[in-house]
Image (spheres, grey):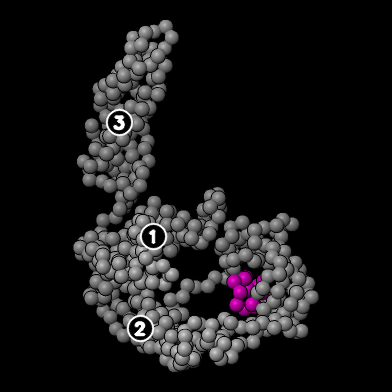
Amino acid sequence: MQVSVETLNDLERRVTVQIPAETFTKEMQDRMRSLSKTVRLDGFRKGKIPIKVIDRLYGDQVRYEVVSKLVENSLQEALVQEKLRPLDGPKIEPQPFEEGRDFAYSATFEILPEFEPTGFEEIHIERPVAEVTEQDVDNMIETLRQQRAIWNVVERPAREGDRVRVDFEGKIDDRDFAGGKGENTNLVLGKSALLKDFEGRLLGLSAGAEIVFDLTFPADYYAVDVAGKTARFQVKLHAVEESHLPEVDETFIAGFEIGDGGITALRQALRENMERELHNGIKARVKRQVMQGLLAANPFPLPQALIAAEIENLARQMSFPPEANDEKSQQLKTQLFEPEARRRVALGLLVSRLAVTQQIEVDGQRVRSHLESLAASYQDPAEVLRWYEKTPRALDSVRALVLEEQIVEWVLERAQVSASPSTFAEIMNSVQPPTGSVRQESSA
């Protein structure tokens, strides 16, 4: 067997394997003889069917089986010989076959990049320094009041912050579309997950008003069926309501089930929760800087197969229609998700490689502590722990998270870290996911 390796680009390889004609012929003959002993054919006794007859009847099938077997066995041997590890299933391309001549084929695939992570000492990290103040607690109480607002009907035009109840129906080219219709839908103007242009049309309208308008969806709208298209909406406004915030009294406090202690106990409970959030927010901001520093210090080629897989994974997470596989949909998915997919793939490879080169192993006790912390927020923590133990994929995600934390700590010991004054609000805003310009639920 002869093997040659061609480098197509940084990560793509083409392995060409040539198998001697006598090896192919012997495999064919052995398979033919085996068939001749088991096949039943009218006019012939069992085991006495001539090889020529077997070849005429089953030759193509036997060649396919022999080729498949030879390719599978020889490719594995060739990869071991050349010390290559395909990232995904190789693309097999047999060369034209001729009787009596050597059989050859090529296998094209990507490999993982080989690199040594470096540049840790040049990474600059600003670690936020902040505390939860009394004003932060006051702001949190105000947020809780807004979440528990009482809505009262008013007889005036709608304005920012009001809640309106509407029926709406949208059509594109006189046709209905998914999510384009709603009845008795409540919207808080300026705070809903609707397109801003849709909400803007409702400002200044009073109960009983009806309006018709055209609205063009953004080209990057999450629903590919309507992205970039113009819809005509008919909207009827049933009611306008303004909010009244509840007083911070015994009834309000009782809703948080903190027991006795009144406002003092509520403020203490809020402070403790906010301090946990602040701690996690600081960790998240530092981790983001560490990962970004690693990426900047370690450029390397990324396998297209991993990027494509991550794009599909992100599309599923964003509820992208699974049936959307046409060329336009693929282009939109690439446009929307490729930058984040590339970042995730690069970070995954960096973390894995760094763990190997620096011999950083997942701390089992930290994994257990993390699981217990997750389970503590559920009614039956023991059942949650058992579920993780029985769900390898979920457990692997926790192990990966713990490994990332260990990598971050390892880098911080070598990076240039400085303190940066901040506030609770700044840190919380920095770790919140960005809000989009489109709705994620069931309205227009």
Residue 157 x %, y %: 74, 82
The residue at the point 37 percent across, 36 percent down is: 93
34 or 121: nearer the eye?
34
The residue beneath circle 2 is 128
Marks 1 and 3 sit apart, C-alpha to C-alpha, by 44 Å
Secondary structure found at label 1:
helix
166 or 55: nearer the eye?
166
At label 2, counting other C-alpha atoms closer than 10 Å, the crowd grade (few under 14, some 14-19, many 20 or more) is many
The residue at the point 56 percent across, 87 percent down is: 252
The amino acid at mark 1 is Trp
218 left or right of 11? right
The amino acid at mark 2 is Pro
The residue beneath circle 3 is 70
The tag on residue 387 is 1
Residue range highlighted in magenta: 188-199
At label 3, counting other C-alpha atoms closer than 10 Å, the crowd grade (few under 14, some 14-19, many 20 or more) is some
The amino acid at mark 3 is Leu
